[in-house]
Amino acid sequence: MSGPDGRAAQADPLDGDVEEALALANDNRGGPRTGSGGAPAPAPRQTPASRAPAPDTERHRATAWPAARRAAQEAGRRAARHRAQTADAPEPVMDAELPFPEGLLTGGRAETHALPRGAARVPLDRALGLVLAAPLTALTDLPSFDTSAMDGWVVAGPGPWAVRDKGILAGHALPAPLADGEAATIATGARIPSDTTAVIRSEHGHTDDKGQLHPLRAVAHGQDIRPRGQECRAGDLLLPAGGLITPAVLGLAAAAGYDELVAVPRPRAEVLVLGDELLTSGLPRDGLIRDALGPMLPHWLRALGVEVTAVRRIGDDAKALLKAVRGSKADLVVTTGGTASGPVDHVHPTLRALDAELLVDGVAVRPGHPMLLARIKDGRHLVGLPGNPLAAVSGLLTLAEPLLRALAGRARDEEPYGAPLHSAVQGHPYDTRLVPVVLRQDSDSGHDWAVPLRYNGPAMLRGIAAADGLAVVPPGGAQEGQEVEILDLPWSWGPATGGSLGTLNSPLKATGSAPQSRPEQAPRPNAGQAPQDTMGQAPRTDMGADPVGTDPVGVDPVRNVPGNSPGDEGCFT
């Protein structure tokens, strides 16, 4: 609809998303719905989490955003317990299969070592991002023999020392013992001969014309020698069960003698892309649009540490959808679109046909209101995402991520972290908003700020593509300087918290906390100066801004504050 000047008229706060408008119009599911024979169709079973009280009107009957996240996490925990109870136990490990010295654990008796049910023995090259299902104990002393910590000379007794003609290199058998007054050149990591006094670094000694080695400083007994077992002894606990397998853990496991690890299996997910209007290549045309979710969701799920078993394009075919969901063996089925109540929205009828249990049916969050979570059977679940791209991201972070983290053994109870908003964010009257932000540090105060990005409509990906995270804006909005919770994205920078390597946290979380002063008292960056990032460089959001101030990610290139692009105002869905 156009205004008098030919431009688009101001959008209603709840306008702009037909799918979500349909969901709002049909949120009151208390009335009868007829099946094929005119009789009322049975509704999917519902749990209390899917029936949160409405703020004041029936159209806002939806699960509160925090409650939806908790319900998804609990669903993942239940699925993990179900898998552990029903999975075949891994084959036990015989002592003979472990690289222990004979009888180290058993005193010479042959024994087997049971592995946790639901766990799997995974080769090191496939274990990255999984969670340890059993403690990691040292299979050998580290180091397993006395080694040289430096290049130089190994010496015995007091000096000066006569230097052997043949040196000692790493990877060779135990060299012959040294006699008092004797030395040999040695490489870092090489085995130390017996009866050795010390290692002299190459820069701390010199040889004279007669081949005698002289120290340039005092020599301490045992210097620059790494004794056997310095890091650990065989049988020592290196890491407890439940730890994330990072690259460093893989290195430690290999050094300790492991070829494979006992880990919680990677969750399996299948993506079903719905909609007849989607193109897989080329430019939009003839009422058709490009599919953004098909290319995005599988990689997003993999970044969360998930094995994506299939990506299927179902279109708007109800029978094909039912067949695909019923036949899926994945732990989680993710659908795109079709979660509202329109003529081709087939997700709810499919769940009814499968007698699925609705755990969450609509969430009080924008974008993404008509998302849902259902338990299909046998510990398997379905997450229904809205069809709009940013709304689908909201659904991933609200329902899919907590469930998958719990199923993978990575769920934990920790306090959320936050950052003060650089500028006020308009809120929805009743619902939480998830708004893309970049995290930037003000060079004057040293405080980190969450800078909202402009392109945050439900159908937009331009903001989230440049974002460090999503700010959780409470109902009613948030003021400038108000601290809000930040949701990490799988590729954000920082220590591991999930994803294929674990989610990498933002610079804010890497520092451990939000600014120490009260958010409302934290000084803002100067109005005429863009805040500097932690490396003292202009923030990434300024990159690519042209001389006239066009900003590609929706942050003003001069003041680094969000603006309003035409048609975005009040678009919450």
Image (spheres, rainbow, N blue to C red):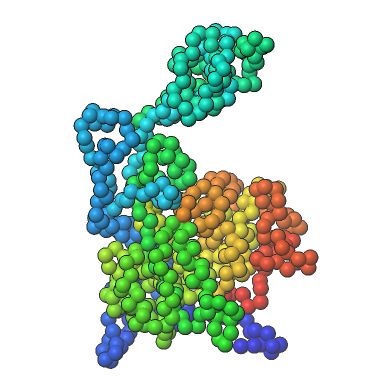
Q: Can I make out residue 476 in this image?
A: no
| Residue depicted at x 49% and y 53% | 503
Q: In this view, does 514 lie above or below 40?
A: above
Q: Which residue is drawn at 52% across and 26% down?
A: 169
Q: Looking at the rendering, which quadrant does residue 100 occupy?
A: top left
Q: Position of residue 485 (x, y in %)?
A: 52, 57
Q: Which residue lies furthest to the right in this view?
A: 547
Which of the image's four quarters has the N terminus?
bottom right
- Nearer to us in this view, 396 or 98: 98
556 in relation to 316, above or below:
above
| In the image, residue 14 above or below residue 407 | below
Where is residue 406 shown, x and y percent of the image?
37, 56
Which residue is at 28% across, 57% downward?
Answer: 83
Q: Which residue lies furthest to the front in this view?
A: 165
- Viewer-closest of 243 and 451: 243
Residue 278 is left or right of residue 4, and the answer is left
Q: Which of 257 and 392 is in front in this view?
A: 257
Say which quarter of the image contains residue 187: top right
- For this view, does 546 lie left or right of residue 423? right
Residue 139 placed where, x, y %? 35, 34
